[in-house]
Image (cartoon, rainbow, N blue to C red):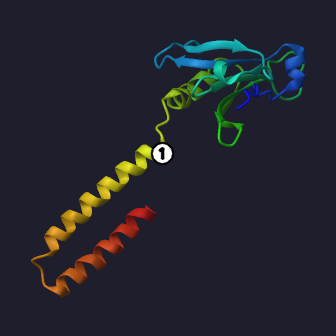
Amino acid sequence: MVDVPIILPNTCPVNRRAGCCHARLLSRVLPHAWNAVGFEGRLCRPGERMSWAELGENPIVLECAGPQGPWRGGRNRPNLWILWRYDRPAGRWQEIARALSTNWDWALVLREPAIRALRPVPDIADFSARGREVTEELLRAIDAMLVPELPAVRALVLTSIYDRMAGKIVA
């Protein structure tokens, strides 16, 4: 397979040209860091092309898209901060969270989603195999408890389990 470069998010190209924005390919987020510090990783330009090797296994990008809204005569405009994850199967960046802020409080909003996003994503096959194991264990336990019961009791129990499981799925 050819290593096609991936383009980092570039939400506000006008701000990028003005030099008002940046992106950080996150490697770590410190949970108890004060204000906006603690978001660690490689500093990049929005729209920069990167190889798969540079992105790593679980690419998470924190983009500062720069000031938003009309200029209001010297008053601070809020900056837009967006947290992105690259979805390899879909072949595109997906937004995780965003914050609009005139100071460092964007970090309070984005810190926890960034920490969660950086956790390794387990392979779905791991869930499927474990799900089958648990299902088999539950069915063996149900069968063992129902063997000594009368057929009418077994039918009532199975109907009740069916109804309650449907309720749990909906919940």
Mark 1, Cα crowd under 10 Å, few <14 / some 14-19 / many 20+, is: few
Name the side, left or right, on which 21 lies relative to 158: right
Which amino acid does the dot numbered 1 rest on?
Ile
- The percent position of residue 159, horizontal first and vertical second, equals 30, 79
Query: Foreground residue, 46 or 21?
Result: 46
Query: Foreground residue, 8 or 77?
Result: 8
Which quadrant of the figure has residue 132?
bottom left
Name the side, left or right, on which 14 lies relative to 54: right
Query: Foreground residue, 42 or 51?
Result: 51
Query: Foreground residue, 132 or 16?
Result: 132
Residue pushed farthest left?
A: 148
Which quadrant of the figure has residue 161?
bottom left
Which quadrant of the figure has residue 141?
bottom left
What's the residue at 69%, 12% (across, down)?
43
Would residue 71 be visible to someone looking at this image?
no
Is label 1 in a helix, a strand or a loop? helix
Name the side, left or right, on which 21 lies relative to 71: left
Would residue 140 be visible to someone looking at this image?
yes
- The percent position of residue 152, horizontal first and vertical second, equals 19, 87
What's the residue at 46%, 17% (across, down)?
32
Residue pushed farthest bottom?
A: 152
The quarter in which the N terminus is drawn is: top right
- The percent position of residue 140, horizontal first and vertical second, equals 21, 64
Count the marks: 1
The quarter in which the C terminus is drawn is: bottom left
Tell me if residue 121 comes above or below residue 108 in the rendering: below
Name the side, left or right, on which 85 lies relative to 143: right
Q: Which residue is mark 1?
A: 124
